[in-house]
Image (cartoon, grey):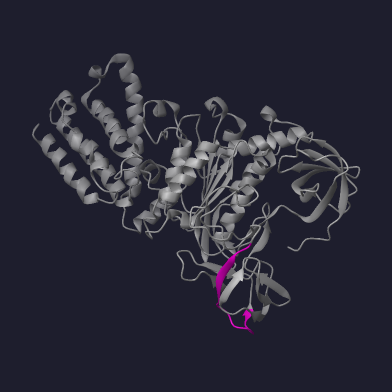
Amino acid sequence: MSAATATTGTIARVSGPLVEVEGLAGVAMFDVVDLGPRELPGEVVSIRDGVLTVQAYEYTGGLRPGHPARARGEPLSVPLGPGLLGHVFDGLLRPLSGMPAFLPPRPVGGGTTPGEWHFEAAADPGARLAEGDRLGTVDPHGAMPLPILVPPHVSGELTWVAGSGTYAADAVVARVGDTDVALTQRWPVRLPRPYRSRGYDARPLHTGQRVVDLLFPVARGSAVGVPGGFGTGKTVLLQQIAKWCDADVIVYVGCGERGNEMAEVVSELSELRDPRTGGPLAERTVVIANTSNMPMMARESSVYTGMTVAEYFRDQGRHVVLIADSTSRWAEALRELASRTGTMPAEEGYPADLASSLAAFYERAGEVTTLGGTVGSVTVIGAVSPPGGDLTEPVTSQTERFVRCLWSLDHDLAYARHYPALSWTGSFSRDADMLGGWFIHHGDPEWARRRARMSGLLAEADRLTSLAELVGAGTLPGHERVVMLAGRLLRLVVLQQNALSPNDVTCGPAKGAALGDAVLAVVDQCERLVESGVPATAVEEVDFGPLVRARSDTGADDAEGVNALLDEVLKRLAQLT
């Protein structure tokens, strides 16, 4: 990844963030060019008749014709090494000035002043090493030890390795063959990091959100689209998943979102405790903040930067969740860039290669066997913000083609204060069938049957509710009124979740299964009562309060408490016989 010999040219014209450069030879598309005396970074987006069109990543105020332009000889690349976890970066993976770190102040690899990190070697000189093999560990006794691996495309004899001690983030700590290996390595953000093979053993990513885990589950290494109009709760849902999912590392990319929302994310993550370790949740979180007031080109690169960071931790054998909020703002940056460079527009002004760009992004998700032989994964969850809530617009419709799961958020549910406002009619999970087999072998053989029955009851309840609005609920036969009751109970007990309740903010698998089974058991009892001649009106007048309150009155993993409340409701129903 060493840069080619730099060349220098001259700025010929400046038009906002678009800069024309003359006199630079041997420069390729997407190479980075430093502009002017302040060396503002920019990316080559067009080459025509020896004139380079460079899109700047920063504000170009003060830049003028005649200033020098220097080519780096490489595409946009970011430093990967110690200091990523627990910090906030911009779209180019530079620490944000003035932004406090989540954790106590520590030096950041890739910053202007590299700090020192404790390194312990794990291999002896003379060993034959291949790409992905472990050379040593940074901070081996910390909450998240960082393995230092042989870089991709490097192999040979370990001729030298540094002893245990503290080293700068850019210090060379080993030599494999003829290649020096430093603690921090650079990698082009648009180039997927290599791996040995892709896995196909589906394992669920537990999110802590019942509507997701019970109805629309996602497998580790899968891709999810989360479309929803303004005010439907996309950001809150993604924040909840970032806080409570069982991933090893969270990479949260705020792409074009409002600054106050990003500030809220940073503030909450800094205060939360990791339920698995008891330490700060920020110890396993990386935030890339590129808000709506930041330059368009940096916004366009931020999702690639986040994906590269996620792949870096994946290569260490970790399971990573990449949250991109939102891919619509990224697509808008692509559209703006296309218009500035004269690219032929397609539907709604988006570039014709929008589908290819989305596919290239989502296909970098996956569970893989790494070069070192471990198993790691990157699960991508991308929010989509369609203008006016139009789910037929290009970004939403193209995203639906390439993701395994779609969690569609509904404005009517959000307006009715039903959160998460995830539509059970407009969402899907292509992972559900595979995950059903996993649950059979891991203690929940009823998972697939439970999911199928809840989905069927919800769909039938929606149909009957529409009918009842026309003819009146009293005209429906008793068993259909029980189905409508089942739909209401499922919505109140299972699908809704209160992010402000300590007991309901997250839900463990056992409690989620218990709540689903409890509602189905109550529905079965109601159906038996109606079949035996008990009027449907009498069944509907039973106080189901204990069951409705079960999600907030019991702990996140308290399945026994749910069953106790279920027994109380069943006793009340038994009094009708």
Q: Residue furthest bottom?
A: 126
Which residue is drawn at the image coordinates 25% and 39% (left, top)? 519
In magenta stretch: residue 409: no
Quadrant of the rendering where the C terminus is positioned: top left
Q: Nearer the viewer, residue 527 or 62?
A: 62
Instruction: Locate residue 13 relative to residue 217 in the image: left or right.
Output: right
The spot of residue 124 in percent (x, y) is 59, 83
**Visible in this render: residue 429?**
no
> x, y (%) of residue 344?
77, 32
Give yes or no for residue 120 being in the magenta stretch. Answer: yes
Q: Is residue 570 visible?
A: yes
Chain part drawn in magenta: 114-128
Side of 480 relative to 140 (left or right)? left
Please determine whether, in this image, residue 80 is positioned above or below residue 242: below
**In terms of depth relative to the viewer, which is nearer, 471 or 141?**
141
Is residue 366 positioned above or below 495 on the image?
below
